[in-house]
Image (tube, rainbow, N blue to C red):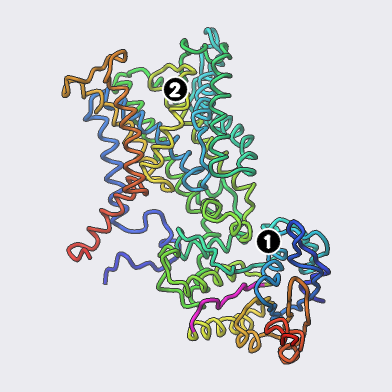
Amino acid sequence: MSLVDFDDVHLSFAGVNAIAGVSFTVAPGELFAIIGPNGAGKTSIFNVLSGAYRPQRGRVTFGGLDITGRPPHRIAAAGLARTFQNVELFGNLTLLDNLMLGRHTHLRYGTLAAVAWLGRARREEVAARASVEEIVDFLDLAPYRRIPVGLLPYGVQKRIELGRALAMQPKLLLLDEPVAGMNLEETADMARYILDIREELGLAIILVEHDMGLVMDLADRVMVLNFGVPITTGPPAHVQGHPEVVRAYLGEAAAV
Amino acid sequence: MNRPLMHHRYSSDMALLNTRAKKVAMLALLAVAALLALLLTDDYLQLLATGAATAIGIIGLNLATGYAGQVSLGHAFFLAIGAYTAAAISGDPHGRTIGLGITSILVWLPAAGLVAAAVGALVAPLAVRLRGLYLAIVTLGLVFVGGYVFGEWRELTGGSGIGRPAAVPELFGVRLDRSTALFTRDQQLYWLMLTLLVLFALAARNVARSRVGRAFNAIRDRDIAAGIMGINLARYKTIAFALSSFYAGCAGGLLFCITGYLTPDNFNLALSVVAIAMVLVGGAGTISGAVLGAFFFTLLSPLTKALPSLVPAVTDDATRTPNIFQLETVAYGALIVVFLVFEPRGLYGLWVRLRSYWKAWPFSY
């Protein structure tokens, strides 16, 4: 059974079609990449999946649960985490607080318990801290624990955002351009983290990325999108040679 | 080897006072604060008691505005609800205004907070739909609604310009607003307010470092990302308003114990604005900042009152210009401008600067 079933989804803004009938499925543990030129609707798919946008038509199922049009916090609690194209960290908060925010849905104590900070609240917080420390280790973030993340370099912020998503212990991870604006070395590091995540945690990942080298190296299957319509879906080798894909990216020879 | 900054457990690293310096400083501060009651004269103690009660309300406003980013100009309204709930519960049953005659502070203080919190939770749906400036204007409306209701509801409030006696602070059968054989009225009230301030501040600090406080911060900084992290925005905005109003309600009940009297005119827009000023000047988003801000503004008034004796041109006669009341208002406004321009983190920010300077001394670069 597939983990994600994205079924004939339509999303438009005032008549402009952002997604016009996209369907795909993602299996548990699969790395599914979505590529396409700017404005193809890749991030819109993420926004529909995570609940930020409500599609006009179609159905989205996640882990057997119909999540179409559900509020984002419900979808997050169901086990979906994402990163953003432009880093959306809480810049005033420290690295630890950002990662602890990732644990939010796993902490169960209420406001009254928080006031007293005894028993359950303290136990859960300490446990959350311990699991956050594993992520700090995993992503080599130890030097930055108590620094407000807004002050840290861009590459580190991208890594922290990945860490915050991992702290949610999701079933599915959406990565929106994880290596955008990174140099070669940082890209290689990020690729290694993504491989490690797959290997150690077995997470399903949907990856949106413009770095074709990265996509072709990592993805199990690739979907190519143009103007909100899927062109083709298949293994990297299949996609690379597809004539429609070449046309979408490079255009065609002008008729003389 | 003795390494005081070395933590072996997350729980000790996460403690509020996680270094020896913090523990010693906090103990010393509390000891000095408690002993002040024996050293200062009654009018200064009254002022400090007012500062402590005010601080409770400002901590509340800071939870909603500084932590959760929900700008509220309606704080005066919630203070009024608390003040009248407390006054009505502890009031004289045979008096001119509503009174149930239950004078125990253990009853009317939580009641004042809970009634205000309930009203805050009712108002919260507005905050769910609005933010920023729009929310500020809507909460401003509360002050005017409250002004009208409390002005007209004479059985409860005594009416504008007349007023009614405030809540009676009685603890375990002792009337704290009457001098006893051992201590004066103002000593007792000061200790009461100080103790409550410590309790309320500690509770707020705990909320701030919990999942609730982090959710508040997340909503303030990026509400869309907060939702995607699994934070229920409507729920946490409601909690922020209810909690903030609870603090306001308790502060309202306590504040007027000190003067013993209140009229609906106490709860005007200026009170809401001064409350916001205290948050900003003290330091938005910090508990100690809220306390600093409240004391700073409260302690300004004896300074302005001393002005006529120092500067002959200034009078304390409200009908002539320049008088101290005008100057006080000008000083409030000027302080807000100066702090926002030069130190947006407020008094707390000044303290942070001072601390990091001495941490690095003598290598201050």
Q: Is residue A26 left or right of residue B244?
A: right
Tell me the number on the disc at residue A8.
none
The residue range painted magenta reads: A173-183
* Badge count: 2
- Disc 2 chain ID: B
Q: Position of residue B325 (x, y in %)?
A: 31, 22
B341 to B246, vertically: above or below: below
Screen quadrant of the C terminus of chain B: bottom left
**What amino acid is found at the position of numbered circle 2 in the picture?**
Glu
In front of the other: B44 or A89: A89
Q: Which residue is mark 1?
A: A77
Residue A254, image quadrant: bottom right
Specify whether residue A177 is painted magenta.
yes
Q: Position of residue B190 (x, y in %)?
A: 34, 29
Q: Position of residue B205 (x, y in %)?
A: 45, 48
Question: Residue at coordinates 47% horizontally, 24% vertically from top-left?
Answer: B268
Do marks 2 and 1 share a subunit? no
**What amino acid is found at the position of numbered circle 1 in the picture?**
Ala
Asked which secondary structure carries label 2, the reply is: strand
Judge depth for marks 2 and 1 and give the one in front.
Answer: 1
Q: Is residue A184 left or right of residue B308?
A: right
Specify whether residue B70 is painted magenta.
no
Q: CA distance from mark 2 to mark 1?
A: 48 Å
A18 to B68, vertically: above or below: below
Q: Which residue is mark 2?
A: B170
Screen quadrant of the N terminus of chain B: bottom left
Q: Position of residue A13 (x, y in %)?
A: 73, 58
